[in-house]
Image (cartoon, helix red, strand yellow):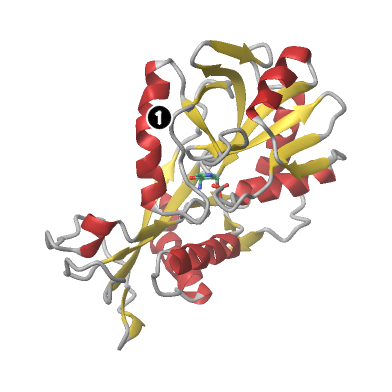
Amino acid sequence: AEWTPDTGWANGRVVPYGPLSIDPATAVLHYAQEIFEGLKAYVHADGSVWLFRPEANAARLQRSAHRLALPELPTDWFLGSVTALVDADRDWVPSGGEKSLYLRPFMFASEVFLGVRPSQHVTYSVIASPAGAYFKGGVKPVSIWLSSQYSRAGTGGTGAAKCGGNYAASLLPQQEGMEHGCEQVVFLDSTEHTWIEELGGMNLYFVHSDGSIVTPTLSGSILEGITRDSIIQVARDLGHEVVERRVSIQEWREGVADGSITEVFACGTAAVITPVGTLKWDGGEVTSGDGEAGKVTSDIRSALIDIQYGRAEDRHGWLTRVS
Ligand code: PMP
């Protein structure tokens, strides 16, 4: 679909996947005025297809749009766009195992204009792609590199928006992490360089030996993960106390070392929940767990996945039927 100030949103249509033809002076290529979302459609045992919390993705897209000076996309356009793609060919929603149809809505500045101001032509599109199980050989802990030099986002910046620029800022630290044998990077706050924010594409949780679960408070520069929010509720349903508060990097290091933190996990739409094993930094490392997912991590993961695949009661009303 396309937006201009005169027409509003118009020209919504489903087209075969293929290249976009872009003028070299298209605003997004120069100023990164761009946002996106990620969500999944799941097939249940009876063959019906469901989206997980699409209204939450629609709401987050609105917040991102606001921060990037992009036009609001009405929630019914958002829901209509993802539903139309799922309906276009029911058979491309994979079933069985932990398979799903990954949906990637995105919106970008498509005006051909080199001046720096909000684009007066905007394009919204959705890619759909069948996704296999995230973990092929069982759920295995990932290792995390602590980026001591770089931040992903700063106070007053775009950290809470899902925009491409945040990911651009995370790529050099990601490369550094990979050079140190780590799969992911943990970012700290940009002022005190003390407080844990999130990974490049996932939020973090810490399980304490008393059974309580802690996740960093939404600081204004953390992405408000929909999985993060769902876990708060699922963990409470399972009887855990869940606390949102600031967590320092010292607490992670010392808590794992002295046993007060028993499990660490990360969460996001793609993997749902990933156990975290080793935290590495320039000069040291600590490892939680024994190379397998911990019990609390596994229980919360199963509880959430069972809701997504219709094997457990949807008591929070998170599922929307598509077909
Ligand atoms: N943080 C960042 C930076 C992300 O890119 C993602 C993935 N969207 C998340 C957290 C997790 O968000 P969600 O649970 O909505 O996928």
- The foreground one among 129 and 200 is 200
| Residue 312 showing in the rendered view | no
- The foreground one among 54 and 190 is 190
Q: Quadrant of the C terminus?
A: bottom right
- Residue at the extreme bottom of the image, as rendered: 6
Q: Quadrant of residue 193?
A: top right
- The foreground one among 47 and 196 is 196
Q: Is residue 18 left or right of residue 10?
A: left
- Residue 95: percent from the left, percent from the top? 52, 43
Classify 165 as above or below 56.
Answer: above
Mark 1: few, some, or many residues within 10 Å (few <14, many ≥20)?
Answer: many
- Residue at the extreme front of the image, as rendered: 192
Query: Residue, x 54% and y 41% (percent of image)?
Result: 191
Query: Residue, x 36% and y 35% (percent of image)?
Result: 171
Number of numbered callouts drawn: 1
Q: Is residue 197 left or right of residue 129?
A: right
Q: Is residue 65 left or right of residue 208?
A: left
Query: Residue, x 58% and y 12% (percent of image)?
Result: 285
Classify 24 as above or below 195.
Answer: below
- Residue 224: percent from the left, percent from the top? 59, 52
Q: Quadrant of residue 16?
A: bottom left
Q: Name the amino acid, label 1.
A: Gln
- Residue 35: percent from the left, percent from the top? 40, 58
- Residue 118: percent from the left, percent from the top? 31, 71
Classify 150 as above or below 137.
Answer: below
Secondary element at tag 1: helix
| Residue 92 showing in the rendered view | yes
Query: Residue, x 62% and y 26% (percent of image)?
Result: 275
Mark 1, residue position: 174
Q: Quadrant of the N terminus?
A: bottom left
